[in-house]
Amino acid sequence: MKKKAIYASLLLACTVTSLARNPIYLDPDQPIEQRVEDALRRMTVEEKVAMIHAQSKFSSAGVPRLGIPENWMTDGPHGIRAEVLWDEWNEAKWTNDSCIAFPALTALAATWSPDMSALYGKSIGEEARYRNKNVLLGPGVNIYRTPLNGRNFEYMGEDPYLASKMVVPYIREVQKCGIAACVKHFALNNQEVRRENINVKVDDRALHEIYLPAFKAAVQDGGAWAIMGAYNQYKGQHCCHNQYLLNEILKRDWGFDGVVISDWGGVHKTNEAIRNGLDMEFGSWTNGLNWSASNAYANYYLASPYLKMITEGKIDTQELDEKVRRILRLVFRTTMSKNRPYGSFGTMEHALAGRKIAQEGIVLLKNRSSLLPIDISKVKNILVVGENAVKKMTVGGGSSALKTKYEISPLTGIETYARQQVSVRYLSGYTSVSSMNQKENIGEQLREEAVSAAKEADIVLFIGGLNKNNGQDCEGHDRTSLGLPYGQDTLISQLTAANPNTVVVIISGNAVAMPWVNNVPSIVEAWYCGTETGNALASVLFGEVNPSGKLPFTFPVLIDDNAASALGGYPGNKTDVEYKEGIFVGYRWADRQKNTKPLFPFGHGLSYTNFQYSKAIADKSVMHVNDTINVTVKVKNTGKREGQEVVQLYIRDNESSLPRPFKELKGFKKISLSPGEEKTVVFPVTLDALSFYDDQKHMWVAEPGRFEALIGSSSMDIRGRFAFELK
């Protein structure tokens, strides 16, 4: 026994020595949780604290003594941001950091295609990996509550189901590249006005039914490795250190095992940052966004103030160790993973992926008399009007600004597709430069010149909209009105009067008012489409590509047709904003307005062909709790060219104890059909599709009663319905 004991002691000593020489945490074949605990045991308190806050504008410290690398973040979500100086926002002026700009996320959402979302995630993930980042600050899934929110272009629309289904493939493909997707901004970040401190008051039903589902899907279905907290407050606590959102919902209820990262300058209190779920603090200056001292990262709330509390014995290291565990888990999933691929950057493959996504996201809103697509054989001259035909849209807008390898403008794309067979002339028609407008009334002169030229053109392509200037789709600023800026409405009306063959192309990330809508034959929503903008747009205008995009949010006629504005729930006062509309956001609100129809409804989008829907049928008319009802519809292309259609499933609850929307999106499928081809689309309906959040019981419930499955081409173009009963 004695010999065995001695042998065991020697074996233990040898094992410890071996571990010291060959730490578990450095072995990529070991389980991640064992690596995390091994590394954690070896770290000093000072090293742990250094790891949980920024050391530069976009990086946090590793542990050089142990060979644990730094963490490097990058803005997306539409492209990999140019390198900035260590402690300044100015560009570092590298010569090899020009990226491919991908379409903004409103354009991605408008594809209604999880396949396009996967392609997007793969492509941007490869770009981030090549640049040796390990956290991509995106995608954003905050709900489109008001069209005045300046940051809507970064998000995935007004419907939680659509956003949930679109965000998951993006995350999965990014993370296959060894890059953590940092889903933002958690939660209720739906306006830029007073965003740093505004306290959101929202009922529990709206919180769980509208504003949380996409984040929940990102965590539980997408497996996101990081979440970014929001600037605003909820329940009187900032969302970057919010007990209810982070500790109770995100980490406890959803089982999130990744890292919670603050938005830059979103931290306000050391005690709350320690206890309320934040793991990593980033900022712009000494104290978030407030003081402009340089290289002062030790002053951050989770830096010296935290370390001092520990060394003085005022607090133990329990919370600190949990934060570091999550950061180590991030490191081992990304930078220290042996399966991490190399990535690629600025490639034509990525540019063409961006073009494909843009082509599928561009929405044909109106096409009276089939003015589009343009037939080159019947057109001799085209007049292109509008500053957005030539303006770079990858700059500006806040943190989504990019330095791109190239950007094809709409004008260049149109000239390329005209192939010297058609004369193309360009006139700006308006200017967004305020000093130019004030000088000699230049705006009126530009308008008169364009209108005069329009009389001589075979077709006029007006390309305008918003432009990422302050107040026009830009971080930090909301819009002040729904209307188009810079006198564009007047210009469009005059162009149409001068030439009835006028096509209006809106480039934006938001809905805009269209007082001229009845006079314009063809309208296109073209979004911000990145590097290949011009080629993507021209391919649709000239018919190389049949448009198949659908709106991911409602276009109201007037701003007061939007629920947040109609009920006085936006922008709130100096301290609070109340979401008075509750669950009735977007089309859920529009469906309740008997005397008002939207300008263009959620899910709307036309094609150059036509689709015929058969009668909707189902395999049963009575559903029990564990059942699935399969709702089936056949769709046929009755036109003369190939096209894609997004078939949409909505569910209506006819007998509810609580107010419910007239209908809610619960399924969609994008299908491609050749002329004359017919396909069968099947939607499985389960109990989840019938459930709502009961804020008295604090749980999801589905009540017995009668329901309807509605099949449509948009939320207001219902082609078939099937009634069934839940027993």
Image (spheres, rainbow, N blue to C red):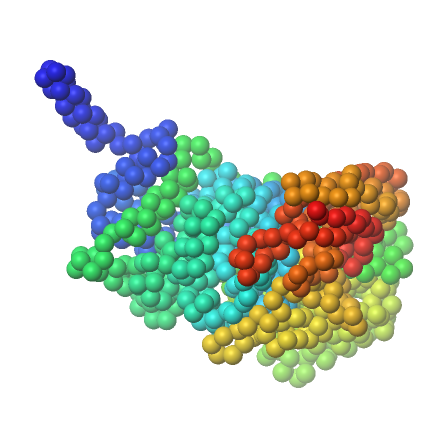
Asked if 637 appears above or below 260 in the picture, the reply is above
Numbered disc total: 0
At horizontal 71% and vertical 72% (from top left) the residue drawn is 561
- Can you see residue 382? no
Along the line of sight, the residue nearer the viewer: 576 or 644: 576
Quarter-of-image position of residue 371:
bottom right
The answer to whether 275 appears left or right of 89 in the picture is left
Asked if 7 appears above or below 99 in the picture, the reply is above
At horizontal 32% and vertical 35% (from top left) the residue drawn is 35
The answer to whether 305 appears left or right of 164 in the picture is left
Position in image of residue 309 (x %, y %)? 22, 60
Position in image of residue 429 (x %, y %)? 72, 72
Q: Residue furthest left?
A: 2
Asked if 26 appears above or below 503 in the picture, the reply is above
Asked if 362 appears above or below 562 in the picture, the reply is above
The answer to whether 494 appears left or right of 297 in the picture is right
At horizontal 72% and vertical 52% (from top left) the residue drawn is 705
Quadrant where the image shows the N terminus: top left
The answer to whether 501 appears left or right of 709 in the picture is right
Quarter-of-image position of residue 680:
top right
Position in image of residue 473 (x %, y %)? 59, 66
Position in image of residue 438 (x %, y %)? 63, 83
- Can you see residue 255? yes
Along the line of sight, the residue nearer the viewer: 694 or 517: 694
At horizontal 81% and vertical 60% (from top left) the residue drawn is 366
